[in-house]
Image (cartoon, rainbow, N blue to C red):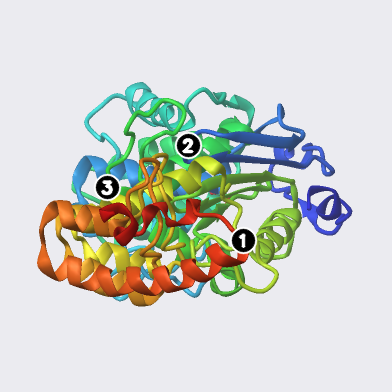
Amino acid sequence: MFEDVRQHRGGEVASYIPQLARADADGFAVAVCTIDGQRFSIGDTTTRYCVQSTCKPINYAIALDQLGIDTVHRHVGREPSGHSFNEITLNAKGLPHNPMINAGAIMCASLIAPDLSAADRFDTVLQTWERLAGQGSVGFDNAVFLSERDTADRNFALAYFMRENGAFPVGTDLKATLDLYFQCCSITVDAPGMATIAATFANGGVCPLSNERVFTADTTKNCLSLMASCGLYDFSGEFAFTVGLPAKSGVSGALFITIPGVCGVAIWSPRLDVLGNSVRGVEFAGRLAKTFSFDGLPETGDQIDPRHRSIEAAIDQATYFCAAAAKGDLTELRRLVARSIDVNLADYDGRTALHLAASEGHADVLRYLLPLGAAADSTDRWGNTPLDDAIRNGDEESIARLQPKMSEVGEHQKGEVSAHGSIEALAFLPTNKAA
Ligand code: GLU
């Protein structure tokens, strides 16, 4: 996919400040970090780029964690705006539409630790980036910051417009707020670091490399909701429709995608389309969504579930299924059956769900599993059948349910015995045992 997408050379590098105009137009990096910390990256993976608008969800999350949802949303809405990212417009309540557009991001910057000094406010943000990125490299590009500030008429206009409408908290220092916003846009990161940040969001706010909780689960969820509806400028609705994953882009060609419960993906490629999104980033995201299914449902059509189904996973499934049977947890068993689990999975000792349900006297589980093809004649490593376990437990219904099944097996096995001339197969038959 990386090589295919690399062929795309459409789009233009952002040129509103010289520092962005000088970016390597052909630069391209893709990085992935899973929620259990597996990492892969390809391309210009050591290049650090400025994060630009990808700082917006992070500033929003910091504000949410510090102040709570009610306070934050007294100052910023949570609806897509239907306007371009820096348009001078507010919602019906006189607030910026959402934290993912410039006005909303400036508002979120005003909410971050307003009582601290400018230096400490920036440190608060930078340290959060470092914690989100685990071992990834995070830095700051002072030239970008100075350029941003020198060419920020629109952002100043937005800030004054919001102040005129009484949108800011009382006592907000506009200049300090705008400086903090420009500084946040000028934070730099490499693609592997950004992928880890995306993975921290995918992991409910816990960094998969350090296992440190950076944001609460609620903050993470709220942030992902707004990324899903507002993360890609005026392409947000189309992206939600075609890709369907929470993501945020920035004019440096940055794009990060969060696949909740699976992984984070970062793409960097500076050529932008007319809406300001990375051409290769959007193309790669589209291919990702077409190639893989992330919903955990059985694979359908051409889509692949990228999660590794190893022997380890199969053993886990068996253990899990058997544990649900041992507890008599029919709801869980039904859920696993709906996900096409093999009802005859056995653990290391050859014990199946049927053995465990019989041992614990869960006749209702036997009633559920037997018609699904759970084998009444399976033997564990000691040669015991589920019926042996039911007899040991003494639950009459369980014995009654398993006994007729075993005599069916008996008939069938007797046939086999004569055909193959072996008496070994009879070893587990109750009649044989009794004898
Ligand atoms: N620094 C840019 C601005 O505020 C951010 C642009 C972006 O990535 O959307 O105009």
Image position of 354 with respect to 200: above or below: below
Residue drawn 44% across the image and 35% down it:
179
Closer to the chain start, of discs 1 and 3, is: 3
Q: Secondary structure at mark 1?
A: helix
Q: Which mark is residue 4?
A: none
Task: From the viewer's perspective, tell me whether residue 350 is left or right of residue 111.
Answer: right
Image position of 41 with respect to 433: above or below: above
Mark 2 touches mark 3? (CB < 8 Å): no
Q: Is mark 2 within 8 Å of ligand 1?
A: no
The residue nearer to you, when weighing 387 against 229, is 387
> Please, what is the three-letter code of the amino acid marked with disc 1?
His
> Please, what is the three-letter code of the amino acid marked with disc 2?
Asp
Q: Which residue is mark 2?
A: 36
Closer to the chain start, of discs 2 and 3, is: 2
Q: Which mark is residue 64?
A: 3
Q: Nearer the viewer, mark 2 or mark 3?
A: 2
Image position of 125 with respect to 427: above or below: above
Residue drawn 89% across the image and 53% down it:
7
Q: Residues within 10 Å of mark 1 (few under 14, many from 20)?
A: few
Q: Secondary structure at mark 3?
A: helix
Mark 2 touches mark 1? (CB < 8 Å): no
Q: Quadrant location of residue 368?
A: bottom left
Closer to the chain start, of discs 2 and 1, is: 2
> Please, what is the three-letter code of the amino acid marked with disc 3?
Leu
Label 2 – label 1 distance at C-alpha: 50 Å
The residue nearer to you, when weighing 427 against 63, is 427
Q: How many marks?
A: 3
State the image coordinates of residue 410 (x, y, percent, origin top left). Answer: 40, 68
Q: Which residue is mark 1?
A: 420
Residue 241 in view (yes/no): yes
Task: From the viewer's perspective, tell me whether residue 83 is left or right of residue 73.
Answer: right
